[in-house]
Amino acid sequence: MLREYINKKLASARYKLLKDGTYFGEIPDARGVWASEATLELCRQQLRDVLEEWLLLKVRSREAVPGFKLKVDQRDLVRS
């Protein structure tokens, strides 16, 4: 489930070669998910890492994630 979501988002990533020769990548519908690196491959790797961390933070804080539905056992939400 997570792998599918991450791969789908990475497929929608946009990359630019900047004037200084570095690469910038972003995922348009994942606000704040971007990376900037010396090579395209490093940029892709960094963007994957940022996306994974972004997703984990969203899930941890129970924020909505576009295109991702987390199945939660309602019994886990009840505190004794």
Image (tube, rainbow, N blue to C red):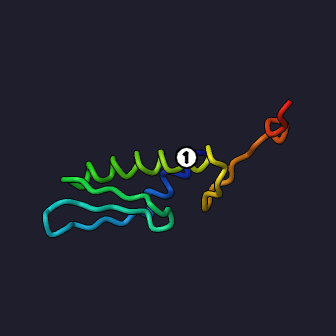
Residue 35, how many percent across, how many down?
Answer: 33, 56
Residue at the outermost left position: 20
Residue at the outermost front position: 80
Residue 55, how many percent across, how many down?
Answer: 54, 49
- Which residue shows up at 83% across the image and 42% down it? 74
Residue 5, how many percent across, how many down?
Answer: 55, 52
- Which residue shows up at 44% across the image and 60% down it? 32
Number of numbered discs visible in the structure rendering: 1
Tag 1: amino acid: Leu
Using the image, determine if residue 67 lies above or below residue 58. Answer: below
Residue at the outermost top position: 80
Using the image, determine if residue 33 lies above or below residue 76. Answer: below
- Which residue shows up at 47% across the image and 45% down it? 53
Residue 76, how many percent across, how many down?
Answer: 79, 35
Which quadrant of the rendered structure holds the C terminus? top right
In the displayed structure image, the side of residue 27 where residue 80 appears, left or right: right
**The quarter of the displayed image where residue 49 is located:** top left
Q: Secondary structure at mark 1?
A: helix
Which quadrant of the rendered structure holds the N terminus? top right
Disc 1 packing (10 Å; few <14; some 14–19; many ≥20): few
Residue on which the image places disc 1: 57
- Which residue shows up at 50% across the image and 66% down it? 29
